[in-house]
Image (cartoon, coloured by chain):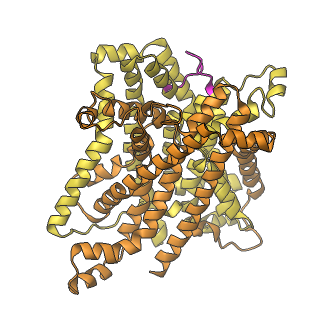
Chain colours: A yellow, B orange
Amino acid sequence: MLAAMTVHHRSHRQGAGTARRVLIGLAVVAAAVVLGVPTGIVFAHAFGKGVEGWWKAVSAPEALHAIYLSLLTVAVVVPINAVYGLSVAWAVTKFRWQGKKWLVSLIEVPFSVSPIVAGVATLMVYGSSGLVGEWLMDHDIKVMFAVPGIILATLFVTSPFVAREVMPLMQLQGTDEEEAAQVLGAGGFRTFLRVTLPNVKWALFYGLILCAARSLGEFGAVSVVSGHIRGETNTLPLYIDLLYHDYDSSGAFAAASVLTLLALVTVVLKAVVEGRRDAAHDDEALS
Amino acid sequence: MSAGVLTAKVPGRRGILPGFSLTMGLSVSYLGLIVLLPIAALLLKASGLSWHEFVVATTSPRALAAYEVTAVSALEAVAFNAVLGLLFSWVLARYDFPGRRLLDSVMDLPFAMPTAVAGVALTAAFAHNGVFGQFLEPLGIKIAHAQPGIAMAMAFTSLPFVVRTLQPVIEDLDLDGEEAARILGASELQVFLRVVLPVIAPALIAGVTLAFARCLGEFGAIIFIAGNRPFETEIAALLIYIRLEEYDYGAATAIATVVLAVAFLVMLATNALQAWQQRYLDKG
């Protein structure tokens, strides 16, 4: 999976005349229809009642709360995943031990679990009939249908993102530089901060971008555990759902336009960071 | 999974670097707490059901209809994506043209765009007065609030899997075989079908399998466009959600267990395919 998802940039061959023109034309038209039109529709509907209508919709107290909750989720989830991802990558790539293959497969499990199943699974731990549900209730700790539940479900679905991006590069870089730092007397943590981290920073950023995008947009898992309490546990994607089913289509699209803007920023950032990451990757492969 | 991750060459038993216990302990505890514990809790809850209850919940006519709608739509979506993904990855890997980088970047849009946003946008596009719907509905083609809408939403959200799996393989293709075939008088179509396709087939199958797995689990994009009528346009993930809302946690966890088991089988198939693809490429 890791190798397959990495895009290497190679020199491009200029193909034979007609086939080349026809295929490029087809691809551009298909991309416009399949990807361009849905994106355009979001903005067309969002601004259907003018800029003022859009502003009114996104600055409504419930909308602002949804934006706040989504950003809060990202702010909590992304750093935790960064620590986990780097930790997994260090354990897997810097040492030799049996059973690595199993750990690497387990790390990727959330990718193949349906978000709804992830939500139900989280509910079965912390919900009222879950493993620790009664204990939580006795101690008056609210996890389900509250912010902690949203964060736990988001952590479940996003946990592989950073690990998966950082591992292949750390593997490629081996342990020579870290071992040299050790010999020169640097402590373990300092070695990591000064040697390893700079080497993998672009792969790390790339993983963080993917993780942030997914945290912002997660719908299925969060909708199971949120309880959909207006102005309290609605993230931005859930708020879109709420407005849409209230037949407030322009409000739903206004909220959707905020997420689409962030998605477009993600795509641009991703393209920039991808270039840097691949450059680091290629340098490493050549040296 | 790339094989490279698994073959570190370190002196000593594990190596001389510090932090093994710390990072290993942290990783395993976190994975256990966040991912494995919930999955175990789900399976535990489902195993609390009697065999009879489990079978009734997972093989009710409504559940069977939901599996069928999900699987059929997913197959349609990946068939569509096999063609479209091949076109995109071929054009991106082989040709240089103004806007290539832009086209390359927008391929990731379905991954970056929240599924709920994709859902409302596609529904608006295929509604009877929508950008596509206004032309399709007079022809009797109904997509929004019908089964084809489910396939459409699945296709949108899973397209990048096919493109991003195929693209690097096409970029790394050795051009000698193609040129030899051309010199021997093969037409462009023959070159593609007889020389290129056999080499990229494993990657195409791997990408399609990844996309298929994603389609089976997709929820957010679909529920807006599907219409969600039981027996007709209700997907398995939605049925789990409905059982939860009815406080029928037993049935919800039973169906979730079936969905989870299928997802693991597809994942095993994907890993096997990718191992096969790797061997195939290494040989060439």
Q: Quadrant of residue B58?
A: top right
Task: Give the answer, above or below, for where B265 lies relative to A179.
Answer: above
Q: Is residue A185 visible?
A: no
Q: Position of residue B240 (x, y in %)?
A: 62, 35
> Residue placed at 77% from the left, 71% from the top?
B13
Q: Give the residue at the far bottom of this rendering.
A: B184
Picture coordinates of residue A152, whole percent (x, y): 66, 34
Does the magenta-highlighted stretch encompass residue A17? no
**Residue at 37% of width from left, 24% of height from top?**
A253
- Residue at 53 percent across and 42 percent down: it is A211
Residue B265, percent from left and from top: 62, 57
What span is in magenta? Answer: A226-236
As rendered, which of A63 and A114 lies closer to the eye? Answer: A114
Q: Is A33 situated above or below A175?
A: above
Side (left or right) of A218 relative to A26: right
The tally of labels here is 0
Secondary structure character of the magenta stretch overall = loop
Residue sitting at x 35%, y 77%:
B174
